[in-house]
Image: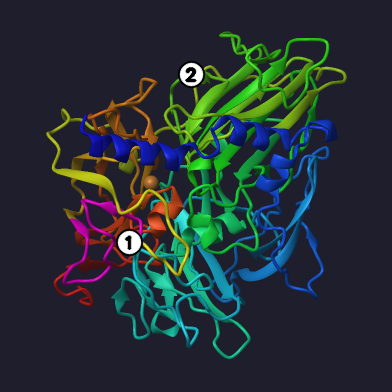
Amino acid sequence: MTQQSDEKKASENQEQDILSSPLGRRAFLSGFGLGAGITAASFIVFGATQNKTTLTGISPVSSLGETPVNGFPQPETIANGTPQSPAQLRVAQENINILGTNPRTELTRCFNGDVPGPTFRLQAGERVNIKLVNALPKNTTGTTDGTCPGTMDRPRCFNTTNLHFHGFHVSPMSIAPGGTIVSGGKNDEVEKSSDDVLYELEPSTTGGSTEHPYCVYLPTDHAPGTHWYHPHLHGSTAIQVVDGMAGALVIEDPPEDKIDVDQDLLWIIQEIIGNSDEDVYTCGGTSREFTVNGQSQPTLTIKPQELCRFRFINATATPRGFMTLKIQKCNSAECDINDVSDDSPWEDVVSNVDFTSGVFQIAVDGISHYQQPPTPMSSMLLSPANRADFLVKLEEGKYRVFKDTFPGVGATTQQTLASINVTGTPVSSPKDIPPTIPGDFPDYLKPFDTPNPEPAKTISFDRAGPSCFNKPPETVIPRKFEVDNKVYDPEPPNETVQNVDINTDEVWELTNTTGAAHPFHIHVNPFKVIECNGCTDEVDPTIWWDTFYIPPKNGQTNGSIKIRHRFNNYPGKFVFHCHVLIHEDLGMMQNVNVKGTGLAPCQPSGGETFTWNPESPSANA
Ligand SMILES: [Cu+2]
């Protein structure tokens, strides 16, 4: 290794290891303990932004959802709207009270005055009708007139927003006034949008609010499962997601495939950082205790043998959000919930292979393991944006949901996310965990019936410039995150884009030339991971993902994965990117053009089609 590459490696480690240094880690963890454990250092970590001014005149609202289950918070569920009367998601800046073990208040941009945002429970074949209202103040970062300019390698437009329906197999396009099908545009240039993240809803420059309707038509054969929505305005995605702008999208099982459970519970994991600015993008910038459903270490109380479905959503945006998620039991008379020592009496739950008790995975990224037995598993790698569903049936005792470190990601922290008390009289006639998961793959998720071809595309994930982002005014060249050594460019002539044909499938090889892991996420169509170089665990090639981490470079060897995916049903333009959203905002994103004829936006299955040809992007067929 040359001296130069040694230095590069050292700086990449520095980028990752701020929180894993002995002082940093101890300080971070001690902040969760009882008073005696709190040191001066912990206040430096947690108090980093406490001197900032906060808005006055806004009374704090509770982040506790409206439908707690035995004291365990659940986000409010709101009904889908109609085209004439859409459900409303109103984005404004509010003080949020985070309740629970370590209460705090955060000034955040949020949906409908709450964090997380409301839950939508939907059916396949349904048209999702949402009006997004932007009541944020006008932009001030990098602009003098409140509009949203900026370059694609810097944080920008913190008060411009939009919506992404993460995990949905739907059209990525919009409709302009007059009916032309388009990708992107600002405010009233676009009449309504499906899952178009290139659309930008700027705030009002004269006070008041702006608004935009979404019409997201789920196909009749959409797989039921756990997904989520969040803003996706390139340059402010990370800051808005750490603010707390995220909510659950649950597509319900059809009645014949529904697993009968006693409790169906969302677990939305967030690191809510309010009143933030470019700090979010710096190395070792502001960090916070992670929450579940907007609470610090909430407690779920259930009965022995009660059957629960847990739907975990990793709604985080920074490298700290990588986690090994564990459900652990206290195997001692007494356990300290925050004990992270090697000889801790907390041990991963042991699952019985006869399904009488334990923790069993049934779905990943919103797609069930159809016709397979539920997988005994009480520990799972979860990258930012991943979801995982489990059937859980526990014996009497004390349990915790623990966020452990992620292999190869130095920035990840250890923390207890929640407690589970299993107590009381066991349920008299317990519900059964099914021996196989009911339902079947729809056509767009059927197994591939040909051998894996050679990669059609090889795409690298790269970093340029210094190891840390520097807040303006910058005195050094900026840190950039890139794909194929280029920062994201949304428009021709230098558009960064991959072109594919509709209703084809391809293998892509994704390489990581950096010392940090990058969770690859692509919109509209999920993928299978058919090969991984650098993964610590074997990857099941039958599982569909919409987000999977590309392992970091190890020595001189790049990390890499090979994925295979289809581009079914929906022509148009969408994106793939790193779901460490601070990397996305600093440039690690590209467009995808799916060329050909297929379903138009806001159309039901079998409805009107259009042809997308990037040489004439406004042409309707
Ligand atoms: Cu990344």
* x, y percent for residue 516: 38, 39
Residue matched to label 2: 373
Q: Closer to us: mark 2 or mark 1?
A: 1
Q: Look at the image and give the residue range highlighted in magenta.
A: 477-498
Is residue 66 found inside the magenta-colored segment of the image? no
Residue 519 or residue 278, whichever sits in front? 278
Residue matched to label 1: 477
Residue 262 is at least partly visible in this image: yes
As helix, strand or loop, the secondary structure at mark 1 comes to loop
**Residues packed near mark 2 inside 10 Å, few (<14), some (14 to 19) or many (20 plus):** some
Left or right of 375 in this view: 516 = left
Q: CA distance from mark 2 to mark 1?
A: 53 Å
Query: Which circle marks residue 217 in the picture?
Result: none
Q: Which residue lies at the image location 75% right of the left edge and 25% below the top edge?
A: 337
Residue 361 to residue 519: above or below: above
At label 1, the amino acid type is Ile
For residue 616, what is the image quadrant?
Answer: bottom left
Residue 563 is at least partly visible in this image: no
* x, y percent for residue 244: 61, 56
Q: Which residue lies at the image location 43% right of the left edge and 43% below the top edge?
A: 15
As helix, strand or loop, the secondary structure at mark 2 comes to loop
Could you tell me if the residues under marks 2 and 1 are in contact, i.e. CB atoms within 8 Å? no
Residue 354 to residue 384: above or below: above
* x, y percent for residue 575: 32, 57
Residue 175 or residue 340, whichever sits in front? 340
